[in-house]
Image: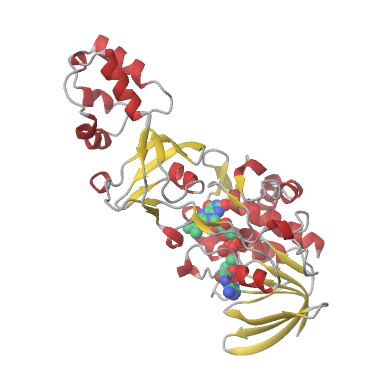
Amino acid sequence: MQVNTLILGAGAAGLMCAAHTGPGTLVIDHAKAPGEKIRISGGGRCNFTNLHTEPGAFLGQNPHFAKSALARYTQWDFIDLVDRHGIAWHEKTLGQLFCDDSARQIIRMLLDEAAQADLWLQTSLAALSHDGQQFTAMLDRQGERVHVTARNLVVATGGKSIPKMGATGAAYDIARQFGHEVTETRPALVPFTFSDTPFQPISGTACPVRAQAGGVSFDEAALFTHRGLSGPAILQISSYWREGDEIVLILDPKGVLYDSLRAARASHGRRNLTTVLAQHLPARLVDHLAPSLGLAGNLADQPDTRLAQIAGALSEWRLRPTATEGYRTAEVTLGGIDTNALSSKTMGSRHVPGLYFIGEAVDVTGWLGGYNFQWAWSSAIAAARAI
Ligand code: FDA
């Protein structure tokens, strides 16, 4: 069978690309259904883009690489597409846009847009070669061997996160086969674990924090879990954390605690210190911290130096995670196909004509909040326009 374009992977990037590559496109995926990660994303409502998308929200060895694709297919272009399909959406927080109803609407929209492409599910790649003109792929389609030749090959098989859902890292093998480098890959947007499970007694407690790691900070919620720490602020800093590093949790991100404690002492000096702190932090967290910080007695018993000491400790809680939960729960893979040998305008290989890498497989990783889908859409369109 001869096609113009063979797309590997019917996820976010692969389907978006298939919608724009014209006739003669075949998309294959080894899963039973297309867009499985879209289906489970955003708690089933898919955080499909972010109003504040800009290159600074993406990590990668070359921080400039994502600029061109993001500028040529923006969040506004995707919102326009969603509107044309009559999908209702809302902004949840921090520019994050979610479907009102279901993530399945985004999958349906992409399948409708890509209707002219053939989609083969439960199909895997057994062998791949390139003769200088075209690609030859040996496919295993539900137990049957099929030989496909294609002028263009788009690799959209994603990263390594959530192997249970079929993530394979196949894109990296294909990249290496054609002489591309792959940067170090690691789980990102992932909870931290601590070997001594210190937060087990307060698991389920959440509070707003400023979380810091690797020189960056995020103001969002942190969640204490059986195994360690999760929540948006923690997932965000996990992309900047390296094994052995400390993280810092600022439990008083607005910096008002010292003044509040002094004011409370003046008006309600007989109140218990922990009772007053529980007006600023979850009571379970205050109880948990009380022994190590020596939180005891009435406010009236605490001189200014002591209040400053308490406010200081809560403004710089240093923790050293043991590890992360790894690819088992990571939302994305940090690192990937080295962008040095890719065109930022087309996602095309500088080594092999007609070869493209898009989506999460590439060394471009977004923050939490719809940025990773926007990269999938933008990089897919960049490749499709060049084909
Ligand atoms: P994606 O993983 O979507 O697709 C790859 C496809 O290739 C899959 O269909 C897979 O089956 C197929 N495949 C893999 N190996 C193959 C092989 N060897 N042969 C054939 N097929 C193969 N992002 C965001 O912006 N907003 C959000 O709300 C969320 N929420 C979220 C929740 C959870 C639980 C996870 C795990 C991730 C998110 N993300 C997210 C991240 C987002 O899902 C991710 O960035 C995109 O799906 C990446 O799109 P791709 O198309 O590159 O890969």
User: In percent of the image, x 19 and y 34: which residue is there?
Assistant: 291
Q: In which quarter of the image is residue 358?
A: bottom right
Disc tally is 0
Could you say where residue 371 lies in the image, as x and y percent from the top left?
60, 48
The vertical placement of 35 against 225, above or below, is below
Asked if 320 appears above or below 26 in the picture, the reply is: above
Asked which quadrant contains residue 6, the reply is: bottom right
106 vs 64, left or right, is left
Q: Is residue 298 left or right of residue 159?
A: left
Q: Residue 252, percent across and down?
A: 38, 28
Task: In this rendered view, identify the residue nearer to me: 132 or 20.
Answer: 132
Residue extending farthest to the bottom is: 144
Farthest-out residue, right: 133
Front in this rendered view, residue 73 or 183: 183
The N terminus, quarter of image: bottom right
- Write down which quadrant ligand 1 falls in: bottom right
Percent of width and height locating residue 386: 81, 61
Q: In this view, does 231 lie to the left or right of 29?
A: left
Drawn side of residue 10 relative to residue 6, left or right: left
Is residue 241 visible in the rendered structure shown here?
yes
Task: Kindly give the residue lying farthest to the top in the view shown.
Answer: 266
Colouring style: secondary structure
For image coordinates 69% across by 66% down, the residue present is: 180
Q: Can you tell which quarter of the image residue 19 is in?
A: bottom right
Which quarter of the rendering shows the C terminus? bottom right
Q: Position of residue 346 (x, y in %)?
A: 77, 58
Query: Does any portion of residue 102 appear in the rendered image?
Result: no
Q: Viewer-proximal residue, 247 or 227?
A: 247
